[in-house]
Amino acid sequence: QVQLVESGGGLVQAGGSLRLSCEASGSIFSINSMGWYRQAPGKQRDLVAIYTSGRATNYADSVKGRFTISRDNAKNTVYLQMNSLKPEDTAVYYCYSIVAVNPSMRTFQYWGQGTQVTVSS
């Protein structure tokens, strides 16, 4: 079993910054993909930023230039630095990962519990 634990959410004024962290723990052989999605009230869960394979990253157009994803492979941790936050960034942010739990390389998808980010105007 693999657990994803997020931290770093909170309330910030528009124009401010927050940094989210997500640590993966448990039966991890390798992490194939890891990143962030978000879900605002009444809306679907959408990609924010993610490592897809190797060092490749993918960002939502709405956050390009403002958000930066980074990682610490030794700690199985991914970070999301969010700058120039806007009220429309308000959402629950979920960590997501695709993990191989043994050398067979069969992979499983995991989600964190979510962390609330609220940006006031």
Image (tube, rainbow, N blue to C red):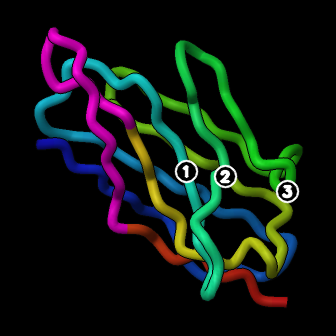
Residue at x 46%, y 36% (from the top left corner): 34
The answer to if 108 sits in the magenta stretch is yes
For label 1, the SS is strand
Q: In terms of secondary structure, where does tag 3 sit? A: helix
Quadrant containing the C terminus in the rendered view: bottom right
10 Å neighbourhood of mark 3: few (<14), some, or many (≥20)?
Answer: few
Label 2: how many Cα within 10 Å (few below 14, some 14–19, many 20+) = many
* Horizontal arrangement in the rendering, residue 51 relative to residue 7 (left or right): right
Q: Residue at x 42, y 68 (%)?
A: 114
- Percent x, y for residue 33? 46, 30
- Image quadrant where residue 109 sits: top left
Residue ID for mark 2: 48
First in sequence: mark 3 vs mark 1: 1
Q: Amino acid at mark 3?
A: Ser
Task: Name the residue that disc number 1 marks.
Answer: 36
Magenta region: 98-113
Mark 1 crowdedness (10 Å alpha carbons): few <14, some 14-19, many ≥20: many
Amino acid type of the residue that numbered disc 2 sits on in the rendered structure: Val
> Residue at 57% of width from left, 56% of height from top?
37
Which corner quadrant of the image does residue 56 belong to?
A: top right
